[in-house]
Amino acid sequence: MSGDSFGKLFKITNWGESHGPAIGCVVEGCPAGIPLTETDIQPFLDKRRPGQSQLVTQRNEADQVKILSGVVDGKTTGTAISLLIENNNNRSKDYSEFAKLYRPSHADFTYQQKYGIRDVAGGGRSSARTTASNVAAGAIALKVLQRANIEILSWVDSVGTISAKIDADQVTEALIESNPVRCPDLVAAKAMEEKILAIRKAGDTIGGVVKCVVRGAPIGLGEPLFDKLEADLAKAMLSINASKGFEFGSGFAGTELIGSQHNDIFYQDENSQIKTHTNHSGGIQGGISNGMDIYFRVAFKPVATLMQQQQTVDTSGNAIEYHGRGRHDPCVLPRAVPIVDAMTAIVLCDHWLRHQAYCHS
Amino acid sequence: MSGDSFGKLFKITNWGESHGPAIGCVVEGCPAGIPLTETDIQPFLDKRRPGQSQLVTQRNEADQVKILSGVVDGKTTGTAISLLIENNNNRSKDYSEFAKLYRPSHADFTYQQKYGIRDVAGGGRSSARTTASNVAAGAIALKVLQRANIEILSWVDSVGTISAKIDADQVTEALIESNPVRCPDLVAAKAMEEKILAIRKAGDTIGGVVKCVVRGAPIGLGEPLFDKLEADLAKAMLSINASKGFEFGSGFAGTELIGSQHNDIFYQDENSQIKTHTNHSGGIQGGISNGMDIYFRVAFKPVATLMQQQQTVDTSGNAIEYHGRGRHDPCVLPRAVPIVDAMTAIVLCDHWLRHQAYCHS
Amino acid sequence: MSGDSFGKLFKITNWGESHGPAIGCVVEGCPAGIPLTETDIQPFLDKRRPGQSQLVTQRNEADQVKILSGVVDGKTTGTAISLLIENNNNRSKDYSEFAKLYRPSHADFTYQQKYGIRDVAGGGRSSARTTASNVAAGAIALKVLQRANIEILSWVDSVGTISAKIDADQVTEALIESNPVRCPDLVAAKAMEEKILAIRKAGDTIGGVVKCVVRGAPIGLGEPLFDKLEADLAKAMLSINASKGFEFGSGFAGTELIGSQHNDIFYQDENSQIKTHTNHSGGIQGGISNGMDIYFRVAFKPVATLMQQQQTVDTSGNAIEYHGRGRHDPCVLPRAVPIVDAMTAIVLCDHWLRHQAYCHS
Amino acid sequence: MSGDSFGKLFKITNWGESHGPAIGCVVEGCPAGIPLTETDIQPFLDKRRPGQSQLVTQRNEADQVKILSGVVDGKTTGTAISLLIENNNNRSKDYSEFAKLYRPSHADFTYQQKYGIRDVAGGGRSSARTTASNVAAGAIALKVLQRANIEILSWVDSVGTISAKIDADQVTEALIESNPVRCPDLVAAKAMEEKILAIRKAGDTIGGVVKCVVRGAPIGLGEPLFDKLEADLAKAMLSINASKGFEFGSGFAGTELIGSQHNDIFYQDENSQIKTHTNHSGGIQGGISNGMDIYFRVAFKPVATLMQQQQTVDTSGNAIEYHGRGRHDPCVLPRAVPIVDAMTAIVLCDHWLRHQAYCHS
């Protein structure tokens, strides 16, 4: 059973391979009457696209999105929205070498074994290029969420062992975008940038963590028992290429606390809103948003493609040596930021629509 | 849109509240012809049930499961299996105090706000009691997985700041069950036990981490782009009450490595199987199992119910004091182990069936 | 992949076999705050249950429904509602004869071949007894629809070649229930009753057609391209045991008309509502309700169990003779009426909730 | 909740409007390793496309399909297949007149009311043009079914009151395609052709019935309780534009029979296969295929667009007159044949894959 769709009321179906003629997705469930043009989507793709800075791959992909359906006279019609991004350099290179081997920590081996066939060029379906379509879909989800005044901000929280020190309440889009790492702690950002450049020079790669905060989410998003808000966020995040972990609120560190430290004490604020003094819950209690900021962190491994010699096996199992080539990211983190934003928006939009069905019935 | 179902081919639909007449679930998609009786399921419920040791709640719940459908003459028929567990002490106490307040870090507030109504007794639907049904369903999933020689083992990896030192390859069911903490590092287990008893005496609670390993999973489980094996595991784990995070393979620690340290180098073993020397991938590459052991960790927060005085608000927002009562777990970890086992089994069984559909077509 | 669930926002998961300990279903997606007790459901089960009149099977099944979850203090909580109906006479008879043969036009052969095993007693899962759970779920759907002033009425439109002559606008619940056939044309009802009694005396059975009208459905229900309202109604109706066909609006007879006869001409009524003079569309245009009455017809075959000698084969394929026994319906139509009502209510409720998600977003 | 997807294991997601830049669909769940190129799909589109004969609309649509993903080196990879068909004449005409009125028995009124906006050009999303994508997807399903030697044949069974007299066992693809009506009874075909031409000349339209037979389906397809094979076929057929009814096996006529006439008596044939003498069951018993030919009929109403003056209302409800223009089908039946073929193939392929998951587990 194919797993190319995500979401229940706001649903995306992703298709396409790295070096095929195009990639894209179909967005179902976008409400009617929302203003939407390609220019609403393009800035998000530009954040994800290669070649933005020295820190990321220097490949040249324009990533121009086209809306093929679901919009008339600049407004959504409530019907399926088809998004298409052409691949510029499709199948231009010779991939015959890759066809004969399994690159370490890539999906070459598992795709070949599972399907008995794989699209070798650029990793085919397993390429992170497929996330561009999700970013485009996420831009539409964000348009829907703007109606509800929900804001999503992600940033690079750590690169290797360099961690940002950030008051999440003070983070702004401008601060995140003020540097190529997308880290709002400018001191850490500088150190991260230097680290990434050094790693790149060494032909190596490095991992890190993205943090995301959702502001303005209404109370009530999340559908227990299984579609708890954090459960769907976790699934969304772990579906992103190279992600290795998810934690929300106090996360793994919270396991070291005792209950009297960890519990978030309720109080009523001056606007008669019930809030909590601390937010170890990360804005979610019992799987349902409680009106506080939702926040979580996503771990990303170092990119598997190295610009150095590595041992591996060919498709017959013989030991061989292999050297990565082409233009790859030394660190996926800066480009992961818009992907985390997008997947978060898709989850929130789905749950927001699900909530509408019941709170109005 | 209700979120009470989980899985696509092997699907469970969970129902019931903590203090209603019964809880249960319907299991759809179990293949026909599998030997199954209540005695296959009961041992897993016994691992989860209260009152097993000093470390967990002393509530008395027999948790006797009944199979109401889908089995004839001791074998599954391929039709929906209905499981029911009666609640012994339902609605016996006076919950009028709880009806008027929101317990800190519980779901009282969010359920009330989302639904405009809540079942106060024992937390109703938000109670971890609902996981008993999942454990029962997981026992059925395990029966299916046994056919494919897939084995699942979970254990307590840390309690507070006490971490086990464990060679995952050496862990056995017997070792896990040799102590009430369910930690196969017996030295750590002793320290954890003492810690939990001290915490309990203080009327407090403590968190920790469960680790899980899946042995014998065939190559090919997982359905990209979104239903990657780790993505569905993450969702399953984050749907468990009190869970705060999920990481697989190298996880969050792996983000501090560089690519040349992190990549898992392929080799061919003496049986002509392609394997990897290291397993930072946690047995999953590109969302698909690669034949190595699958392993992951799940963070659990300290239980929110404390046997001590806490500040909170009543349902009108007025500040009040509240003191937990009843018999609650000082540490959820030992009882979380069979729940992690069960949810893992459900995910694996679902993906194993999904894989059958295609590898035979 | 099991097909025991139906619906998307309002979803039922049906379980149980004819002669197991119980049957039941889980209803997900019922909005919170709806008054609900067993006495809201029981009258619908009483309409479906055996032994109501001479026209139907004389089996004695009390069909007492229990609500096990999802309701507190007489109101729905928005969480899964579990319904259970105990089977009284489970496995009391000797079914060893049936185990060795395939009854003509029953599901014995296909279940055995598909699953390699079957529950012989009373037909197991293939028994129409499973529809009792759907009727109970439909009663809940009707409670939801009452909020929206949607009314559903089904009746027997024909038995064999005897057709009712009915002005659908004049049909009332009282008129339908005024006779055991459930046909509001009292002259036809009398003829149908005599026909059924004669057929029963002959040890034979007879088919017929149920007609259903939905009054008060708002404009906008139905989700093209595939979840058109008529498509989901068709699926619901064809999932009922013994059903052979579905037509809405002008149906099969409409294929003999030309467009200028068939088109429904719009006009504006005195309340500024846009309506149509005729209603060949059956209240649905382009898959979406248009505010006119929705009506459709469902064909039911003659019951397969005859009280007479028939040829068939045993499970080894040898020709044998077989004589039906027990107490069976000579005509399923009177008891099909509440089932059609229920499945219609479930479809309407599902689409009504789906519509809420978008019309409020 | 959007209804643009159909199927569970073999799933299509349809997008696009009549006069947008393109239409298309994403096919998920096609097994890997199946030979597939555009030339496998194009002949099916050519059967559906306008301008084939005098009997259908004379619009010029090339309907050239492009495969954008999921195929490498002429074989399916097991990942999502994206199909795209460009619209040639998109938005070339002036549709401002249509924007102001509701055409009788079209979806103009219901789309406008449901979504508050509609794509006026060519009917937008409600146009039967969207079925071209389904036909393309059906061609892929047919490739999968060929592996299992399953054959699907549809033909025009009646036009208005002219019915074909056909022995379904003798029908061949060649016989169906031997005349522009697609009716294998050549005498009836001639009469139908004359009738359609006369109707066209009168500026009117006419309905009819398509019959479909599935040969070679293995025993075991269909997933009770709700995803019975006939239930999913009914949904598929009623989702086709202009369809009004579905019946399988003996259908509505079977309701006039008594059980002793209607029951299909089992026997064992010379190859030790258990078969039935008659086939009133239409190849499906208890929702599961029994190995006999599956057959059913689908009713189609006369096309709503007439080349004559009609009364209607404008969007403000004022009575106006309207005259259809452009090139429309006088009878949808000949072009409905490949659509019925395609939707049948999609349902069968989905159920065939679902069956694989369990019969191999």
Image (cartoon, coloured by chain):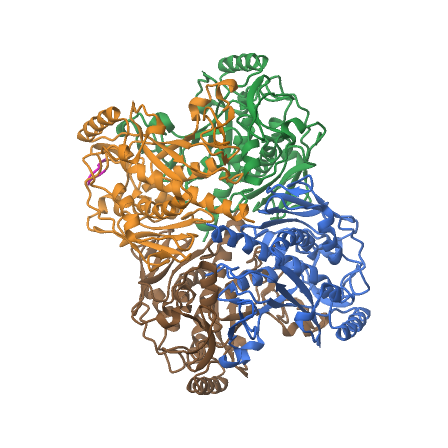
Chain colours: A green, B orange, C brown, D blue
Q: Is residue D353 above or below residue B174?
A: below
How many labels, in total? 0
Q: Is residue D360 left or right of residue D135?
A: left
What x and y, as percent, mark residue C123? 40, 68
Q: B67 or A339, which lies in front? A: B67
Q: A143 or C308, which lies in front? A: C308
Q: D306 or B166, which lies in front? A: B166
What x and y, as percent, mark residue B16? 32, 51
Q: Is residue C22 visible?
A: yes
**Magenta stretch holds residue B325:** yes
Query: Which of the 4 image quarters holds residue B236?
Result: top left
Q: Is residue C216 visible?
A: no
The magenta segment is B322-328
Q: Main secondary structure of the magenta part?
A: loop
Q: Is residue C219 left or right of residue D35?
A: left
Q: Is residue A111 above or below residue C216?
A: above
Q: Residue at x 60, y 41 (%)?
A: D79
What x and y, as percent, mark residue A260? 26, 28
What x and y, as percent, mark residue D233? 57, 61
**Magenta stretch holds residue D152:** no
